[in-house]
Amino acid sequence: MPLEHYPQAGFELLDDCVSIWRFMKIRTFTRLIESGSLYFSRADLLGDEHEGLPLEDYVRHVVANMGPGHTFESTWETLQQDRQGSFVSCWTLDESLHMWEKFAPEGVAVKSACGLLKAALAAMPARTMVGHVRYSLKHEGFNILRFITTKRPEYFREKEVRALVWDLERSPQN
C-alpha cells in the first residue's frame, strides 16, 4: 500500500535526504539485525499513559457538544481502544546527549535517511505514514490520527519523526 500523507499541520512528509536517528537498547538492535525488520510498538504500550490521547477536559468539551447518547466514559474508552490499532516506530532528527541517555544508555543509534524509511513503509500492506510529531496541549478536531501524532510539550526535546502503521481492525472495538 503506498505511503500516505496525513494532512495535519506539523506532520508533513520529510524530504528524503533528511537524516533520522533511531536510538535503542542492544537487544532491540540485535532483533533488528536478526530479523531485518523494523519494530513497531502499539501506541498504548509506549510507556506514556497519555500517548495518543487528548486531554480529558478536551474530550469532555467535545462530548458535551455531541448531543444525547454520547458519554465521556464511552468516548474515552473508544479512544483508548483505538490506540491499540496504532503502531509506531519512533525516530528523531537529533543525535543528542538527551536521546542517548533516555533511549540508549549502553545502547546504539542507527542513522538513516528519511527516504529509506519511507521506502520501507511503502512496501508494507497496511496504511502507513511518517512525519514530524507535533508538541502541543491544544487539540484541533477529534481524530485518533491527530492524537497519535501529537505529544505533550514536555517531550519537545525528542524532535520525533514518527513512522505510523494504522490498522484499526486490530482495535478491540472492531
Image (spheres, rainbow, N blue to C red):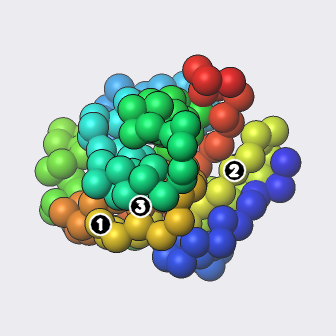
State the CA–CA distance, disc 1 to disc 2: 25 Å
State the CA–CA distance, disc 3 to disc 1: 8 Å
Quarter of the rendering occupied by the C terminus: top right
Q: Which residue occupies 68% across, 36% down? A: 167
Left or right for 4, reference 74: right
> Which residue is label 2 attached to?
128
Mark 3 is on which residue type? Thr
Q: Nearer the viewer, mark 2 or mark 3?
A: 3
Mark 2 is on which residue type? Thr
Q: Which residue occupies 34% across, 70% down? A: 138
Q: Is residue 52 above or below residue 30?
A: below
Front-lying residue, 60 or 9: 60
Tell me the quarter of the picture where residue 152 sits: bottom left
Give the total number of marks visible in the rendering: 3
Mark 1 is on which residue type? Leu
* Label 1 with label 2: CB-CB less than 8 Å: no
Residue 81 drawn at (x, y percent):
50, 29
* Label 2 with label 3: CB-CB less than 8 Å: no
Front-lying residue, 156 or 22: 156
Tell me the quarter of the picture where residue 5 sits: bottom right
* Label 3 with label 1: CB-CB less than 8 Å: no
> Which residue is label 1 attached to?
137
Q: Which residue occupies 74% across, 61% down? A: 4
Mark 2 vs mark 3: which is more N-terminal? Answer: 2
State the CA–CA distance, disc 2 to disc 3: 16 Å
Mark 3 vs mark 1: which is more N-terminal? Answer: 1
Mark 1 vs mark 2: which is more N-terminal? Answer: 2
Q: Is residue 49 above or below residue 156?
A: above
Q: Is residue 45 visible?
A: yes
> Which residue is label 3 attached to?
150
Q: Residue furthest front?
A: 68
